[in-house]
Image: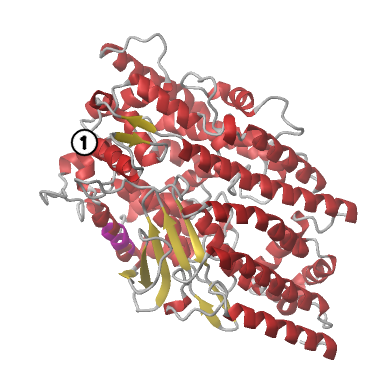
């Protein structure tokens, strides 16, 4: 690479100054920890802002160097150089934004608002850089003669299209407006998440009378007492985190308290101090304008132009293909539960959602002779951890070794070194299992560093799994419900996608795949929660040591498709809400509550409750990356059902099948078209009927 003397001198001086500053900041300095692990023991909140400032400056200098290069644009000096730019910023941002979700505080939330315009400006500095795009376009136009490898072709295609989709072809006035919209949306998304976390933490159900605990299993009572003690309160406290909310709704015989808890959960950020209704409307409106600027009628048209299904029409046809046979069955399932409730003493005029949760659990317990209380003693968290990690060993030959010498960001976090069957280091794997006020709800997988190869040196990933599982109580260790075990397996499937990544380019490795493909590895792993061959390797009663019986496993398997149509319609309702917001052609004329009511009215299986709303707490589409893409959970279930049928056909531990899944899916990232990778593994295109058959709907 050639530079003029003055440019080279300036860049050298800037790099020297930046390097000196970086050495003093634990977010940017070279880590002396094994594998270069993040220095969580040294990082202070005050380190973030200067680290971001220095990393952004460094990233811009790298972009400037690409643009100023006097040599003709090539794949190496433009596309690869861009791919590898901004490494320092990636390092800082991956730590900050992951901890914002897993272990935040007010200072970090305020800092996030300060950082938002800086990060947006940096992103636009790249995506709207005319001279940079000229170089990218020049390489793109000569792509047929470059003799590129498959992953290089893929990187060139994705880079070029991302610039076009990011506004590179806009005129100056349009670029200015696009920049402003991007910053405004970023700030609104931050506000959405901040409001939701505050609204979730603001509510607790404080109980002081033992009669209010009627129907609750002992583990739920112990959980309430433990939460109360943590909050410095007497009695029992239940909140809106999943391990607290769900069992209370399932087991409490106090209909009034279930109603209170349900309405609190379903009305988060619907009104009051942490209201998200207007935030939802503003995000949707600004996304419409973004789509229009880029030449699309709706934001969904813009998003889906780059997905496996490809269009709004195809998504709607797909969801209809699932909903049409499922809806009548779902309504029959609800009617069956209501009839059971009325035979057993329910006399209220209207069967409400908080009634359904309670009575469906009672019906399940009676119809299948199965309950969470009966199952939880067999799923001690520590045993589940060993079993889930051991499952990866059995399938893929990899091993996990806990590393207590590597610092973590919270005392509850464990970290493991992952090695391949030949002893090769694969990844660090961080596990964060328990709820706390500084963590948002739900469960997710993420990474502190992705896999890539630069200048011949491979960077292996730092993968993280974050959950909100049942905590230990004063009288028992952490005991998981079977649903929680399934959630653990789901997120671990995502983790394997990151851990087993192989490739040169980080933007194409691991979970950096199409949104409607990314859930395939996670949902494949869920199947093992219902496999006797695996359950009998670890599920022992934590007190007696008794192995889970064949009879109990048979009940788990028999109950697998209980309410399958009802839950499928529930997911399709979420997908419908998502598509309704993102197929708008103008700002919504009603507030989020009424907008949502209208959107899902045809898919209702239970009464609509005034004042409740999913949209105002729907992080996936208003804060996460699933806008116009929530349908992908169901699409991935189709991929999974079809793919899993090969495991069933050949044997769930068949080494040829698991090796093929690792080779064709888990290790490949997005180095090839996802549809091609699926065909390479399964031998045909995905069949939606596979899911309907698996769920017992067809």
Indicate the position of residue 440 as horizontal and vertical percent values.
Answer: 48, 47
Disc 1: which residue: 218
Q: Is 254 on the left or on the right of 82, as rendered?
A: left
Q: How is the image coloured?
A: secondary structure
Residue 367 appears in view: no
> With respect to residue 273, does 125 lie above or below?
below
- Observer-nearest of 5 and 423: 5
> With respect to residue 366, does 68 lie above or below?
below
Q: Residue at x 46, y 29 (%)?
A: 264
Indicate the position of residue 684 as horizontal and vertical percent values.
Answer: 51, 52
Residue count near mark 1 (Cα–Cα under 10 Å), binned few <14, some 14–19, many ≥20: few
Indicate the position of residue 664 as horizontal and vertical percent values.
Answer: 48, 63
Q: Residue at x 80, y 69 (%)?
A: 132
- Observer-nearest of 624 and 552: 624
Q: Residue at x 32, y 22 (%)?
A: 359
> Is residue 480 within the magenta segment?
no
Magenta stretch in the rendered image: 386-392
Quadrant for the N terminus in the image? bottom right
Quadrant for the C terminus in the image? top left
**Dominant secondary structure of the magenta stretch?**
helix
Q: Secondary structure under badge 1?
A: helix
Count the marks: 1
Q: Quadrant of residue 464?
A: bottom left
- Observer-nearest of 682 and 31: 31
Q: Is 267 on the left or on the right of 128, as rendered?
A: left
Q: Residue at x 36, y 24 (%)?
A: 257
Q: Is 369 on the left or on the right of 687, as rendered?
A: left
Q: Is 148 on the left or on the right of 172, as rendered?
A: left
Residue farthest along the bottom direction in this orientation: 5
Residue 476 appears in view: yes
> With respect to residue 409, does 8 lie above or below?
below
């Amino acid at each position: 690479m050639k530079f003029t003397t003055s440019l080279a001198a300036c860049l050298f001086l800037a790099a020297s100054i930046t390097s000196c500053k970086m050495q003093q900041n634990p977010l940017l300095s070279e880590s002396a920890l094994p594998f270069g692990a993040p220095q969580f023991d040294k990082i202070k909140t005050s380190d973030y802002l200067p680290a971001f400032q220095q990393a952004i400056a460094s990233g811009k200098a790298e972009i400037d160097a690409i643009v100023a290069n006097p040599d003709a644009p090539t794949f190496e000096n433009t596309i690869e150089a861009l791919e590898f730019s901004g490494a320092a910023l990636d390092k800082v941002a991956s730590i900050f934004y992951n901890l914002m979700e897993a272990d935040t505080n007010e200072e970090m939330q305020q800092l996030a608002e300060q950082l938002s315009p800086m990060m947006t400006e940096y992103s636009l500095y790249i995506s709207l850089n005319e001279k940079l795009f000229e170089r990218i376009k020049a390489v793109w136009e000569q792509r047929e003669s470059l003799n590129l490898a498959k992953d290089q072709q893929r990187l060139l295609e994705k880079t070029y299209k991302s610039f076009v989709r990011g506004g590179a072809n806009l005129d100056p006035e349009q670029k200015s407006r696009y920049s402003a919209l991007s910053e405004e949306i970023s700030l609104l998304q931050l506000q959405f998440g901040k409001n939701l976390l505050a609204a979730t933490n603001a509510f607790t159900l404080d109980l002081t009378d033992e009669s209010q605990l009627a129907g609750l299993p002992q583990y739920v009572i112990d959980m309430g007492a433990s939460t109360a003690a943590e909050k410095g309160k007497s009695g029992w406290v239940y909140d809106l985190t999943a391990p607290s909310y769900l069992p209370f709704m399932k087991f409490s015989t106090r209909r009034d308290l279930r109603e209170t808890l349900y309405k609190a959960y379903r009305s988060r950020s619907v009104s009051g101090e942490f209201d998200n209704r207007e935030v939802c409307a503003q995000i949707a409106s600004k996304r419409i304008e973004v789509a229009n600027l880029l030449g699309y009628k709706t934001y969904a048209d813009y998003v889906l132009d780059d997905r496996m299904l490809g269009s709004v029409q195809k998504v709607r046809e797909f969801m209809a293909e699932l909903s049409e046979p499922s809806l009548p069955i779902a309504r029959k399932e609800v009617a069956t539960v209501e009839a059971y409730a009325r035979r057993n003493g329910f006399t209220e005029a209207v069967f409400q959602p908080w009634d359904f949760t309670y009575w469906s659990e009672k019906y399940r317990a009676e119809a299948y002779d199965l309950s969470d209380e009966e199952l939880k003693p067999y799923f001690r968290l520590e045993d589940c951890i060993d079993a889930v990690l051991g499952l990866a060993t059995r399938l893929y030959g990899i091993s996990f070794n806990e590393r207590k010498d590597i610092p973590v960001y919270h005392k509850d976090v464990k970290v493991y070194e992952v090695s391949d069957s030949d002893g090769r280091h694969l990844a660090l794997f961080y596990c964060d299992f328990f709820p706390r006020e500084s963590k948002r709800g739900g469960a997710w997988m993420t990474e502190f560093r992705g896999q890539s190869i630069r200048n011949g040196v491979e960077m292996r990933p730092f993968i993280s799994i974050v959950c909100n599982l049942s905590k230990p109580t004063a009288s028992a260790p952490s005991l998981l419900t079977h649903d929680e075990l399934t959630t653990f397996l789901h997120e671990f499937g995502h983790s394997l996608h990151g851990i087993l990544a192989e490739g040169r380019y980080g933007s194409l490795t691991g979970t950096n795949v199409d949104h409607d493909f990314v859930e395939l590895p996670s949902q494949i792993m869920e199947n093992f929660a219902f496999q006797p061959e695996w359950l009998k390797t670890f599920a022992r009663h934590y007190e007696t040591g008794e192995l889970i019986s064949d009879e109990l496993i048979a009940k788990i398997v028999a109950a697998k498709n209980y309410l399958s149509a009802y839950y499928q319609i529930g997911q399709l309702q979420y997908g419908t809400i998502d598509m309704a917001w993102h197929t708008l052609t103008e700002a919504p004329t009603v507030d989020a509550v009424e907008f949502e009511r209208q959107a899902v009215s045809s898919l209702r299986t239970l009464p609509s409750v005034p004042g409740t709303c999913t949209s105002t707490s729907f992080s996936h589409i208003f804060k996460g990356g699933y806008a116009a893409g929530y349908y992908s959970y169901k699409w991935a279930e189709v991929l999974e059902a079809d793919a899993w049928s090969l495991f069933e056909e050949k044997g769930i531990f068949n080494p040829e099948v698991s090796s093929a899944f690792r080779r064709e899916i888990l290790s490949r990232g997005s180095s090839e078209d996802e549809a091609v990778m699926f065909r390479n593994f399964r031998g045909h295109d995905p069949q939606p009927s596979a899911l309907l058959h698996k769920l017992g709907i067809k």
